[in-house]
Image (tube, rainbow, N blue to C red):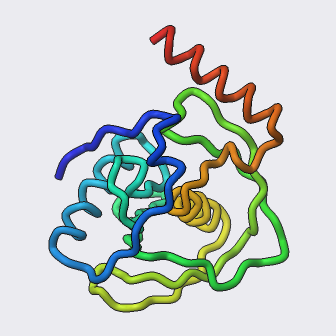
Amino acid sequence: MTVRAFVPYPDKRLRTAAEPVAEVTETVRMIWDDMVETMDAMPGYGLAAPQIGIMLRLAVVDCSDKRGQAVKMANPEVLHTSVQLRKHDEASPNLPGVFAPIERPRAVTVRFLNEMGEIEERDFVGLWATSVQHQIDHLNGKMFIDHLSPMRRKMLVAKAEKLRKRA
């Protein structure tokens, strides 16, 4: 397993929808393993393949208290969302040093191809739901800053740029 480098914002791959995965192969499983390793090294709660420059609809999420519970998903899609919303500070390693509170549905039902290549439907609640939705946004070429007002988004991007130049 390898910790992969993050694609820096504003790389166009972060604004491009990822390609569907035809089947779960050994290559897909190796990419997932690298993604989990990269997510754990951040540390973070989830990672989408485009964040590391792989333009496939692959995501991993692990919001467990003890690591090692990662859910590996290919082609995840939200089937149902709760009416109740939940606000949580979100960030991205592609735009380091900044975060913002984002409101999303508190619970979601998601269909995806699992590690065995089987279609699975799973309910996610709380932080798990937030992370899954955040990763699906990445797969669709969208970032957490897109949920903000244009002025707030501009301020966060400018702050991240300032921090990058200092580093």
Residue 48: where, in percent of width, then height? 44, 57
The residue nearer to you, when weighing 81 against 158, is 158
Quarter of the image where one finds residue 21 = bottom left
- Residue at 75% across / 68% down in the picture? 105
Q: Residue at x 52, y 84 (%)?
A: 111
Residue, x 67% and y 65% (percent of image)? 126
Left or right of residue 138: residue 53: left
Q: Is residue 117 left or right of residue 88?
A: left
Please say if 12 is above or below 72: above
Q: Nearer the viewer, residue 55 or 27?
A: 55
The total of numbered circles placed on residues is 0
Which x, y percent locates residue 113?
39, 83
165 vs 85: above or below: above
Look at the picture and state if 101 lies above or below 151: below
Horizontally, residue 39 falls left or right of residue 144, namely left
Q: Give coordinates of residue 87: x percent, y percent.
A: 78, 54
Relative horizontal placement of residue 79, taking residue 147 as reference (left or right):
left
Name the image quarter holding residue 42: top left
Q: Which residue corresponds to the image point at 41% horizontal and 91% vertical from the top-left?
A: 119
Given the current orientation, which residue lies at the most extreme top position? 166
Q: Indicate the quadrant containing the C terminus: top left, top right, bottom left or bottom right.
A: top left
Viewer-proximal residue among 89 and 27: 27
Q: Is residue 84 above or below residue 154?
A: below
